Image (cartoon, helix red, strand yellow):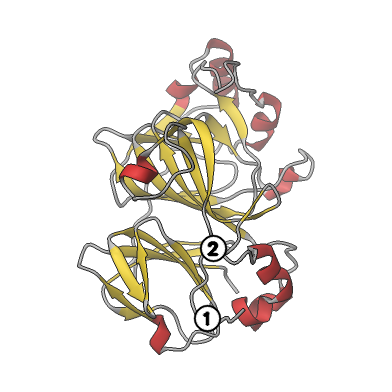
Amino acid sequence: MKFNRLIRFTPIYQSRVWGGRRMETLLGATLPDTTTPFGEAWAVSDRPEAPSATAEGVSLHELWTNHREEVFGTALLASTSPTFPLLMKILDACDDLSIQVHPPASMATELKGEPKTEMWFIAHADPGAKIYAGLKLGTTRANFEASLQNGTVAEVVHVIQAHTGDCLFIPSGRVHAIGAGLLIYEIQQNSDTTYRVFDWNRVGLDGKPRALHLQESMQSIDFTDFEPSMQQIAADGTLVTCEYFDVKLCSGSKQAGAVGESMTLAVVSGEISVGGTVLKAGDFALMPVAMEAAAREVTPADAKSQWLEIRVPV
């Protein structure tokens, strides 16, 4: 396999009780069937339960394990992660997701889970859509525990109005939920540990109430995390920079990174051409370090075409 061109993976679609069909209607995706509510597309995944692979059958895990220097560069050779350290998804929320939390690194091992810090870029928001994130100012652990007992958790969680183009950073320990009417690109640590705090008293696709994880949640929630706001977009397009990922929103004709740099491109609106490959909204592509400068030139179809550049910090 040559590593001097974009690497594309086949999306892995996941059915969810809160999902819908908007990856088909808004992004033009070909979903596996005509009726299932698909809530997630795992676009770049090095998870054993849902491994990303190219059309030729080459897995992301194989690239990370056996071709790390050629694809990801010498700087990431020192990484001790046995898997590619990020998981990238598109989420279609047609109903409110559960109010949940992910364990911080300090607690994850004890709770037999994996830490997860993530970020959301909102590619589409219905009018009135909202996000739940952090606690309302003044909420204490005792207040929160009381809300669990009387089913009023939503009343102590901070609500943010959501709009297309917004971005929110979700460090581990931040209680949160995606509201109905949102199509979101999620960039996160390679983890699938989620503790449900409250699930709106509904049942799953099997007709049974979904499990809650109250003990684990109470050990994971940051009770000093009050009323966060959406990320401010920096002048250079930077949305989030943290120890796990750097994400930048881009538009206009430009070169994607320097020669010798690896990143993932994710088109959030419109269409772009990169080194002769056309990528449309909903498409992700891994850019290997070997791609030359000319092949890194990004040409957008129009002024509304935007994409994310996602990097693993080195």
- Locate residue 65 relative to residue 28 in the image: left or right: right
Q: Kindly state the secondary structure of the residue where label 1 is placed.
A: loop
Q: Nearer the viewer, residue 51 or 227?
A: 51
Task: Indicate whether 253 appears above or below 218.
Answer: below
Using a 10 Å C-alpha cutoff, classify the residue at mark 2 as few (fewer than 14 neighbours), some (14 to 19) or many (20 or more). many
Task: Indicate whether 47 appears above or below 213.
Answer: below
Image quarter of residue 94 = top left
Which dot, 1 or 2, sits closer to the camera? Answer: 1
Residue 86 visible somewhere in the drawing: yes
Q: Kindly state the secondary structure of the residue where label 2 is placed.
A: loop
Task: Name which residue type carries label 1.
Answer: Glu
Task: Name which residue type carries label 2.
Answer: Phe
Q: Which residue is mark 1?
A: 261
Return the disc, 1 or 2, that comes first in the chain's sequence. Answer: 2
- Locate residue 203 relative to residue 21 in the image: left or right: right
What's the residue at 52%, 33% (across, down)?
A: 16
Question: Can you tell which mark lies on residue 36?
Answer: none
- Locate residue 129 relative to residue 154 in the image: left or right: left
Q: Nearer the viewer, residue 243 or 44?
A: 44
What's the residue at 57%, 50% (across, down)?
A: 117
What's the residue at 59%, 46% (across, down)?
A: 172
Q: Which residue is mark 2?
A: 245
Q: Nearer the viewer, residue 45 or 232?
A: 45
Q: Position of residue 302 (x, y in %)?
A: 20, 68
Q: Position of residue 237 (x, y in %)?
A: 34, 67
Task: Indicate whether 267 appears above or below 72.
Answer: above
